[in-house]
Amino acid sequence: MLREEPMMGEGDRGGRVLDRVRPAGLVDVPALVRLIASRAAGTPPVIDRAAEQVQAVLRLLLAHHALEVGHVWVAEQHTGELIAAAVWLPPEADRDFSRFHGLIARELEIPPDLLALGRADGEALEAARAGTRDWVLLVASHEGDCSHVLLDRVLAPGLQAVDRQNGTVVAWTASIPEAGRLEAFDFRDTRKVALPSGGHVWLTSRPPATARRPRH
């Protein structure tokens, strides 16, 4: 289990309230959705036209999957705005997309064609991982507000948990610059993954601790 201890970020000087890193809860789901949606790149028109429905699906998956079986850490500015998030799903997490789509179809009024695209995108993401049972990481951050030090603090609890298991991580990001920021944390082999919906994401992976060179 990850230790649920708030950690203070580097923040601002001059007596102002510091930025901080903390585990997310249900109350953070709307802000998490806004942060993730704001980082989306290459979004196809069919998804843009259904933005509200797509965000409703994301809220459901965060609340009823990521926060239940995974670990979510966020960086919060002194204003209360979330500027970075790391969503971790462990290898044992359920990847049965048919169950997710059953939940979505039951709880939300999603058009069948959009639901089919979502299913196809999910299957494409799993295929890109070649069926491996690795940790999965979704990263979203505002590069201008989230420094390297703060991003390090957001990722640290999850990376420590992975390294204790000598595990491998596959990370998904919405942009190549965001994937590039992960290189400092031993992520490698970044590649673009095209999705059936017409969009794309970036995949990058981090090998287990025993397969990595020591960082100097």
Image (tube, rainbow, N blue to C red):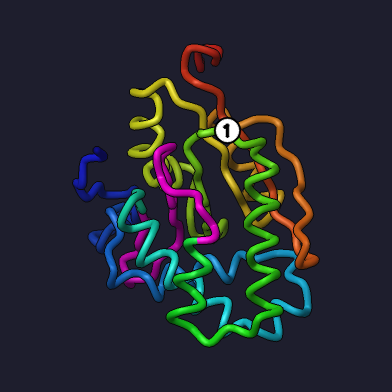
The residue nearer to you, when weighing 64 against 71, is 64
Amino acid carrying mark 1 in the image: Thr
Q: Is residue 139 left or right of residue 44?
A: left
| Mark 1 neighbour class, 10 Å CA radius: few under 14, some 14 to 19, many 20 or more | few
Q: Is residue 194 left or right of residue 63?
A: right
What segment is highlighted magenta in the picture? 73-98
- Which residue in the structure is indicated by mark 1? 132
Q: Position of residue 88 (x, y in %)?
A: 42, 46
Q: Position of residue 185 (x, y in %)?
A: 52, 32
- Identify the residue shown where x is 41% and y is 73%: 31
Q: Position of residue 169 (x, y in %)?
A: 52, 34
Q: Is residue 83 on the magenta stretch? A: yes
Q: Is residue 177 on the magenta stretch? A: no
Question: Is the residue 108 above or below the residue 145 in the image?
Answer: below
Q: Quadrant of residue 52?
A: bottom right
Q: Quadrant of residue 74?
A: bottom left
- Identify the residue shown where x is 44% and y is 37%: 91
Say which element carries label 1.
Answer: loop
